[in-house]
Amino acid sequence: MSDFSRAQGRAADALRPVRITRGYTIHAEGSVLIEFGATRVLCNASVLDKVPPHQKGSGQGWVTAEYGMLPRATHSRSDREAARGKQTGRTQEIQRLIGRALRSVFDLTLLGERTLHLDCDVLQADGGTRTAAITGAFVAAQDAVNGLLAAGRLSQSPIREAVAAISVGIVQGTPLLDLEYTEDSVCDTDMNVVMTASGHYVEVQGTAEGAAFTRAEMDKLLALADKGIRELVALQQASLLNK
Amino acid sequence: MSDFSRAQGRAADALRPVRITRGYTIHAEGSVLIEFGATRVLCNASVLDKVPPHQKGSGQGWVTAEYGMLPRATHSRSDREAARGKQTGRTQEIQRLIGRALRSVFDLTLLGERTLHLDCDVLQADGGTRTAAITGAFVAAQDAVNGLLAAGRLSQSPIREAVAAISVGIVQGTPLLDLEYTEDSVCDTDMNVVMTASGHYVEVQGTAEGAAFTRAEMDKLLALADKGIRELVALQQASLLNK
Amino acid sequence: MSDFSRAQGRAADALRPVRITRGYTIHAEGSVLIEFGATRVLCNASVLDKVPPHQKGSGQGWVTAEYGMLPRATHSRSDREAARGKQTGRTQEIQRLIGRALRSVFDLTLLGERTLHLDCDVLQADGGTRTAAITGAFVAAQDAVNGLLAAGRLSQSPIREAVAAISVGIVQGTPLLDLEYTEDSVCDTDMNVVMTASGHYVEVQGTAEGAAFTRAEMDKLLALADKGIRELVALQQASLLNK
Amino acid sequence: MSDFSRAQGRAADALRPVRITRGYTIHAEGSVLIEFGATRVLCNASVLDKVPPHQKGSGQGWVTAEYGMLPRATHSRSDREAARGKQTGRTQEIQRLIGRALRSVFDLTLLGERTLHLDCDVLQADGGTRTAAITGAFVAAQDAVNGLLAAGRLSQSPIREAVAAISVGIVQGTPLLDLEYTEDSVCDTDMNVVMTASGHYVEVQGTAEGAAFTRAEMDKLLALADKGIRELVALQQASLLNK
Amino acid sequence: MSDFSRAQGRAADALRPVRITRGYTIHAEGSVLIEFGATRVLCNASVLDKVPPHQKGSGQGWVTAEYGMLPRATHSRSDREAARGKQTGRTQEIQRLIGRALRSVFDLTLLGERTLHLDCDVLQADGGTRTAAITGAFVAAQDAVNGLLAAGRLSQSPIREAVAAISVGIVQGTPLLDLEYTEDSVCDTDMNVVMTASGHYVEVQGTAEGAAFTRAEMDKLLALADKGIRELVALQQASLLNK
Amino acid sequence: MSDFSRAQGRAADALRPVRITRGYTIHAEGSVLIEFGATRVLCNASVLDKVPPHQKGSGQGWVTAEYGMLPRATHSRSDREAARGKQTGRTQEIQRLIGRALRSVFDLTLLGERTLHLDCDVLQADGGTRTAAITGAFVAAQDAVNGLLAAGRLSQSPIREAVAAISVGIVQGTPLLDLEYTEDSVCDTDMNVVMTASGHYVEVQGTAEGAAFTRAEMDKLLALADKGIRELVALQQASLLNK
């Protein structure tokens, strides 16, 4: 498309190498390490036999998420949120996004009165941690649901279809798929897209970091995101087919 | 466009009545009460002769925002954040959005080493508080900047152009402009669009509350938002022309 | 009485212009904007069908208050309490005072097991915010109680009589009624008096800001307060007679 | 005066036995245990070579206070404020009162740029803890100032005169001096009076706990308080004359 | 043993004078002031008719402790934890230690579903506050249990045996018993030992403050601690024999 | 030694398989994943060019540690400390221990005015997380120091010798080395020992969870710990010899 050249000769419309490792830790009902290049996020799914107050007695379940970043997941050390005594606005924004994204593909009535709690912790950050978290959390959630089905605790899956997420952005005039940190920090426009396997949008969050963006640019970014999501959904399914 | 009929015979592509009252309080450098129908937000702009640590010594200024909702701005009383001891995730998300929206039209170098602090407090809520806040905060910011120019504290305006925001959504299949609360609470898709006077996007945040949405639906929503923003920018300019 | 001359030729024993606007917002069961000159406080009364733990099962109700000041209600911007994560000692002191003042005219047994929650938020401050809050909160409380009576949820009013509050002080040797900010900030003695319509004291809080004060001075201040309270009670009643 | 009979045959206008023990702990510059009957408050005065930000560079000093109650100072155990993570509104109200009371007799310019910090901790509570704290804190403050004078760090005392405090109230129609807990918990009106040695008021805080009170009742209470304060000031001076 | 000479000619293996005052305050079910030389800790035992959630319905009781230090218990004033809004790590470490130490001698089944809450507050610190707190808390706990037995609320004591604690350390090569502050602040090794009356260990916490320590040094410290604990247990029993 | 048989036929005096992976993440100056059987702790060492206030201007450096546990590192999910808004007492106790252990082998003067910050985050827990953290943090610290030496930012290593830690305990009368979770949860006595390569003690923390323990038992535990530490130090050195 244009002149900006990416690290390691990556094409403007190419994802970084994606790796999905299931069963990464032993205690969680679903445990996935997902890597988008050097970004590594551990997504653990816990099945809890309780629901938040607003759902109690409704017969419905709940799906929620929390997000964290290890202090030295980043180039320079950032403060530990537990030590500071509160989560940043950025953390809260991201964990609310992950929760909404996962809920969008769940039929909460079929889940029964239990909570699926997704903990997404960034071990190493290189851009795209929230999109990797959503993509990996879906696989962890599927593993947890499969466990409930296998144990006879659910008779029908509450998951309607897969969901995945990717970032896109414009760097020096070039629309790019799956920004890594060095690209993200200089981009003019940054967009995160969450989409279902059937190609419908769950979230579109576009932000002009520098100059405001045009409708034509947005169209290009959405097309790139479509391509990336399709590839991620295929990778999720391939991973889930492994024993 | 479709069958959903709105309160008071409002057309699907019509804004609610918008009122912008400048000089609403006496102490702030800019003070605007903005009303989108029954939604009323007080936007106060303060000029502070200091910048946050990360800007100190840079010669640049800063623009930031805080958002609050009076406990009984809503149908049923919500807890006072000051009494609970923290702001909700929703509040933080909104105030970060307002801050980014306003910064997008500022040249921070021309502002000099001072902060423009925008306080947006919702006196009465009926849907669209964050978009009303952005639209009103711009007018308050312009008043504050005009004061600095008139006092000779600035020789050139740091504001590049106007910025405004509007919500759009799909209710029972009908794309609607400027959702009020009863519409917002039943919509399938909810999108907030922040745009400059020149028609470029600053933020696009679309969320599927119920079913995920298609590209065709998004296109309709973006077209409605364009229309709404154009009207809001005209109302901002008209208001600023009054003495 | 003496030489100190007040702004706009106000007499030492005169209130500032008082305005009471009922039905100021649409959601609260009682909603009053009260103005003492340039001081403007929004007093919202909410009826909640629950009581604090210490009243549960007692058959009695509760009346409580919270107080807040918008960050730019004052001449220079003050920190937002919700962002700082706690209410100041001053805020807590004031909201406890408002709660005690209102409870003093309520028969909690007649209120039934519900809470009347009064939110007093200062939109613009120019001295006397706590006394305006008490005076306005009474009107909002009366509106909320009238609503309960009209709806048949109460058969007898739990309100025994009206209550109002006013500040008095000594500035440059002159006893003054209803101090505005420029007077308050230079006064030697500052006294807030809360009184019932029948002329009994609910609270008397006198503080020497500069020199300690004599018994003779206190007597003069109490006489001024009596006069002010009588006028405020008349204004409350006049306001409540309007449909 | 009336029919209410007090514990141990105490007259309505009599203080409880007051004991003032100086040098109660070894580290503080002034350390006083004050007892009003069974109420015991430890008042420690610390001299700190710094002032709060708002006084920095002014050449003036500062006098401030903090108040605490041991969890089992009371009949039933109350939560430890340090464990709950915040001070109650009552605690803040009391420590602000103690600070104002002490500052009222200080010439902050003569104190120099240092802070006199008064820590008042209730070891055992039986009513009147705030008035005992003020009365004891003055003695601790005098000891700390005497130490500065003796060490040549001050050449002139910044203390203008003594200050003391007492509670008065109306129980079953009888005005009483120095309420103990069983009286305080049933009184209709409760008043705390802070007064200088020369008989001027620093604070008068009267609150109707039950029925509102009349001017005649207030006059009786003020007369009782005058008598009590005179006796307390004499006890402070006697204590300070001991080596 | 060596050359280091202690204040007031104290032998290396001697405790400071220990004083145990029972019934120090009037409200608590057990109230003990314990002094190890100039260290003074008030230990109040409260009997609460509730247990923490994890024990509810178990038929078992609970024993827990909280620790605090008055701001001016120390040579220079330290911040009040209630004002800072949290307990330090040191405070939490100590109160967890006191709780474990006391629980080690309790049969929680015999205590019934109630909590024994021990509040240990340091009035004056001169080293060894945590060991004084444990030693004094045991006496307060015994008094509270004796009260329950006398009132017929317990038929059998849940206390199996006494527990006490002492510090030992190495200063300039000399092993010392019961370090006071000036010794503690220069010691190379500091060890706190909690032991039962029958001579078994409940806790051993040795820390190298300077050079790491050898096995031979540890043996000497443990021997010193044994001697100290035996003496403390005898003092506890003697105190409890007094009416 | 006795009858208790361990999982997988492990001998009472055997460590679990230990794996030390250096360079586990890319950003930290030292990054080590250490595994004691199923316990996995990520230890990241950051070099910061600042020191805490109490060391400023001293020319000395500082070594400190923070500890965290991912919410689903454990068998059942525990609350996220960042979301709860504070670290537990257990977390603070452990991170203070890690900090002291590492400082014990550092010459802070040779480190220069910089901080070595060790973040120890438990990815998977199966007993012994604090001892694994100390043992792994030393390797990460050594890597960070080697980086400073290689870059010429230090001319001499501030590390005096290696330090490692292990847990020992008594289960059903059998002294065991390196307890795993199922052993830890039923043990009578639990002891953590931190020791230098030269065989000196840095910390000994023994706690009776059930019955108090005897001197003879302590001697057996210390002997086991000696053996374990010697093996761990050898494994640290072997790991550091790899390129």
Image: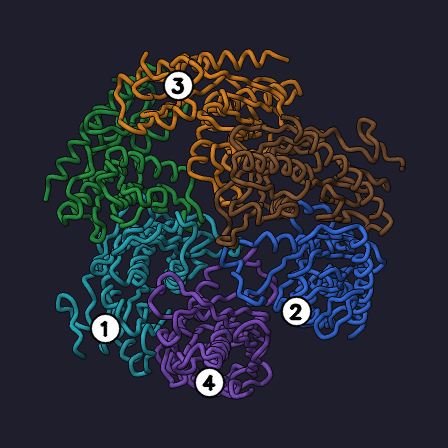
Chain colours: A orange, B green, C cyan, D purple, E blue, F brown
Residue E221: percent from left, percent from top: 78, 58
Quarter of the image where one finds residue C234: bottom left
Mark 4 → mark 3, Cα distance in angstroms: 77 Å
Q: Which chain's residue wears label 1?
A: C
The mark total stands at 4
Amino acid type, mark 1 = Leu
Q: Which chain's residue wears label 3?
A: A
In front: label 4 or label 2:
2
The residue labelled by disc 4 is D233
Mark 3 → mark 1, Cα distance in angstroms: 66 Å
Mark 2 → mark 3, Cα distance in angstroms: 67 Å
Quarter of the image where one finds residue B130: top left
The residue labelled by disc 1 is C176
Quarter of the image where one finds residue C184: bottom left
Q: Is residue B176 left or right of residue E15?
A: left
Amino acid type, mark 3 = Tyr
The residue labelled by disc 2 is E40
- Residue C169 sits above or below residue F199 on the image: below
On whether disc 2 and disc 3 are found on a single subunit, the reply is no
On whether disc 4 and disc 2 are found on a single subunit, the reply is no
In the foreground, C27 or D131: D131
In front: label 2 or label 3:
2
The residue labelled by disc 3 is A201
On whether disc 3 and disc 1 are found on a single subunit, the reply is no
Figure quadrant of the N terminus of chain A: top left
SS category of the residue bearing label 2: strand
Q: Is residue A58 left or right of residue A93?
A: right
- Residue D60 sits above or below residue A97 on the image: below
Residue A16: percent from left, percent from top: 46, 17
Label 4: few (<14), some or many (≥20) within 10 Å? many
